[in-house]
Image (tube, rainbow, N blue to C red):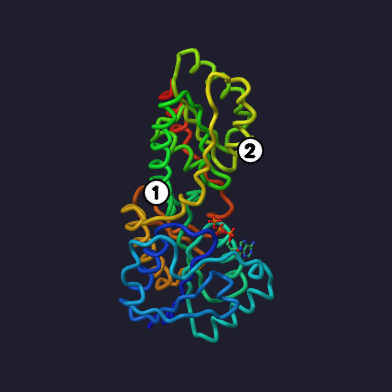
Amino acid sequence: MGKIKHIGVLTSGGDAPGMNAAIRAVVRTGIYNNLKVTGIMQGYQGLIDGLFKPLKSHSVSEIIQRGGTILKTARCEEFKTEAGRKKAYDNLKKQNINGVVVIGGDGTFTGAKIFNEDYDIPFVGVPGTIDNDIFGTDRTIGYDTALNTAIQAIDKIRDTASAHNRLFFIEVMGAEAGFIAIRSGIACGAEAILIPEVKDQLKSLKKQLVEGSRRKKTSNIIIVAEGDEEGGAAEIANKVKDDFKDYSVRVTVLGHIQRGGSPSAFDRVTASRMGYAAVEALLDDQKSVMVGLKNNEIVQVPFRKAVKTHKEVNWELLELAGILSV
Ligand code: ATP
C-alpha cells in the first residue's frame, strides 16, 4: 500500500482561467485512486488558518467551464516565515493530509520548495498563471484563454483605430514577461510590440512610426507589455505623442478582463492533464516537482529548476512580428 491516502489541493497567487478544471482533475483522479481529497481555501493563508473543505466528486461538478477558482486564492506573507510554515505543517498533520497539489505561479512554487526542504509532506505543483512565465513548461494554465481574450479586445480596438487616424497604445498583462504581448501582437497584426525583455525600444519605435506615417498608414496598434521598463502604455504614449501630431493618440489598458472568462478548450484539456499528472506524481512518491507540458507531453520539473531558471520568450516570434508589420 502506498503512503498517500489523503491529499490536499489549493490555488495560490494570481487567479487564472482553467484553475477550476485543474482542481476538478485533482479531485476526480484522487477519488479514482481511492484517496480522500480536501480543498484548502485561499492558498497558503488557508493552510495556515486551517480553512479545509472535504471535496467529493460532485463538489467539482460543473466547474470545468468556469473562470476563477472555487478554492479562492490569496497572497500570503506569513507563509514566507518559518513560524507560518510550521503552522501550515501542523494543520496538515492534524488533518492527516499526506500530499498537497499546489496550483499557482513562481512564488507558489518557491514557497512549496522551501516547505519541502523542512517538512516531509510532499508538495507537487501545477503551473497556473496567465503570464506563461514559468520555466520547464511550454504553457501555463490560463495563458491561452488570456491571450484569446486580449485578441478579441484588440480586434475591436483596431476597428475604431482605422476609422480615424489613430495611434493606439494597448497595454496587456504578463507581469515581467512579454509572452501575452508577443502572441497577441502577432495575432492582431500589431505595428509594434514592446516587451520588458527588450531594452531601449523607444528610438526604434519612433523610427517605425515615422516610416508608417510616411507610407500613410491610417492606424497603428502598439502592444505594450505591462512590465515594460519604459513604463505602461500611458507613459509611453506620452513620450511619443508630440512627435506624431497627425495621429490622435489613444491608450487602452486591457486590465483584468484578461484574467476572467470561461477557459479555452486548450486550457481545459491542459489543466485536466496536469491535474491528473500531479496526483500521479504524488502516488509515485515524488515531491518538490512541478508538472509541465513540453512538446505536448507531460513532464516533471523540480521546483528548484522551475523557479530559478529564466524562461525566454520566443525571439523568432518577435522577429516575425517585425517582418510582418512592414
Ligand atoms: P502569479 O505568477 O500569478 O503572481 P505566484 O504564485 O507567482 O502567481 P506570488 O504572490 O508571487 O504569486 O506567490 C504566491 C504565494 O506563494 C505568496 O503569497 C506566498 O505565500 C508564497 N511565496 C512566495 N514566495 C515565497 C517565499 N520566498 N517563501 C515562502 N513562500 C513564498
Three-letter code, disc 1: Asp
Q: How crowded is mark 2: few (under 14 residues within 10 Å), some or many (20 or more)?
A: some
Front in this rendered view, residue 300 or 144:
144
**Mark 1 CB near ligand 1 (8 Å cut):** no
Front of the two marks 1 and 2: 2
User: Residue 46: x percent and y percent?
Assistant: 56, 75
Label 1, label 2: how many angstroms apart (C-alpha)? Answer: 25 Å
Q: Are marks 1 and 2 in contact (CB under 8 Å)?
A: no
Q: Quarter of the picture for ligand 1?
A: bottom right
Three-letter code, disc 2: Gly
- Residue beneath the point at 50% across and 16% down: 213
Q: Residue furthest top?
A: 214
User: Residue 177: x percent and y percent?
Assistant: 54, 44
Q: Quadrant of the N terminus?
A: bottom left
Locate residue 277 relative to residue 307 in the image: left or right.
Answer: left
**Residue 205, quarter of the rendered image:** top right
Q: Residue furthest front?
A: 164
**Residue 116 vertical position relative to residue 247 in the rendered view, above or below:** below
The local secondary structure at tag 1 comes to helix
**Residue 72 vertical position relative to residue 164 in the rendered view, above or below:** below
- Residue beneath the point at 53% across and 54% down: 306
Locate residue 220 relative to residue 269 in the image: left or right.
Answer: right
User: Residue 190: x percent and y percent?
Assistant: 44, 30
**Residue 136 vertical position relative to residue 184 in the rendered view, above or below:** below
- 1 or 2: tag closer to the N-terminus: 1
**Residue 13, quarter of the rendered image:** bottom right
Circle 1 sits on which residue? 144
Circle 2 sits on which residue? 231
The local secondary structure at tag 2 comes to loop
User: Residue 3: x percent and y percent?
Assistant: 43, 81
Front in this rendered view, residue 82 or 38:
38
